[in-house]
Image (cartoon, helix red, strand yellow):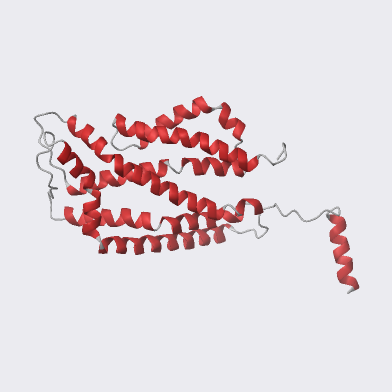
Amino acid sequence: MKLGIGKFALGKLRSGGKKEDKESPSEDAMTLTEHLAELRSRIIRAGLAVVIGMMGVLAFYEPVLRFLRQPYDNVCRRRPDLVSNCDFFSLGPLEGFNARLKISLYGGLILALPIVMWQIWRFVVPALHAKEKRYAIPFVLSSVLLFVIGGFFAYFTLDKGLEWLISWSGEDVQQAFQISKYVSFVGLMIAAFGIGFEFPVLLVFLQLVGVLKPRQLIEGWRVAILVIVVIAAVITPSGDPITLILLTVPLIVFYFISILIGYLGTRNRPVDA
């Protein structure tokens, strides 16, 4: 018993009588091999979630396909002068299979997104402080919610982009869309908007962990807007100005909202924190 008390007192003296820092990252240091094993397990879990989601989408392929082609049908009804034949075409024996596989993959990724984001967070958590770890649930929920909002925003504005692209083909050009290319186009549009709408989550997170400060973001708002426009132009598959504007404006609004959220989340911190 005396030996135990002596060790405890010695430990207190070495630490200068200070309390253990609860804000430090986890002391369970992992080796490179352990990090790789952890990464592999997280990838496997996320992959299994995607596969299960793909199977679910594959079981409802026909309703999902009708849902995805609705923007194209809207253009057909609104502008019969541009599109006279609204049927999709398959130019090879494997094209239908490829389209079905793509729809299943895109849908599986969306359905598995909560699990994928959770696995990403769990892999990052050991490197974070105690206060930063409590952001797990808000991080996952906000990431999924914003991706879904971005995806639906892309879907409900897709017919405008399609109409603009088709009109630029020329009056003497007959439109005949391949099913696999149309599915790829819609999938890329949804992914571009969904990933773009994750932008405020990243900014808020960087502010909460102290990498960025709200004042820095406010001072650099002009450069930020220019960067947003460039990134939106790069990730927009269609390249049309309508889609570019519809993606850029929400991102600019999200930029300033993320500054406000970051300020509210860090306003009680010490100045030197």
In the displayed structure, 82 sits above or below 113; it is: above
In the displayed structure, 151 sits above or below 170; it is: below
What is the tally of numbered marks visible in this picture?
0
Residue placed furthest toward the front? 78
The residue shown at (61%, 44%) is: 208
In the displayed structure, 186 sits above or below 5; it is: above
Assign the C terminus to one quadrant of the image: top right
Assign the N terminus to one quadrant of the image: bottom right
Q: Position of residue 250 (x, y in %)?
A: 42, 36
For the residue pair 257 and 108, the one nearer the viewer reads as 257
Left or right of 86, for residue 9: right
For the residue pair 180 and 265, the one nearer the viewer reads as 265
Q: Is residue 163 visible?
A: yes
Left or right of 71, for residue 267: right
Q: Quadrant of residue 181?
A: top left
Q: Position of residue 191 (x, y in %)?
A: 35, 45
Q: Quadrant of residue 196?
A: top left
Left or right of 101, for residue 136: right
Q: Position of residue 88 (x, y in %)?
A: 14, 48
Residue placed furthest toward the bottom? 1
Q: Quadrant of residue 80?
A: top left
Q: Position of residue 221 (x, y in %)?
A: 52, 27
The residue shown at (66%, 39%) is: 267
For the residue pair 170 and 148, the one nearer the viewer reads as 148
The residue shown at (52%, 61%) is: 38
Residue placed furthest toward the right? 2
Q: Is residue 211 visible?
A: no
In the displayed structure, 170 sits above or below 53; it is: above
The residue shown at (26%, 36%) is: 160
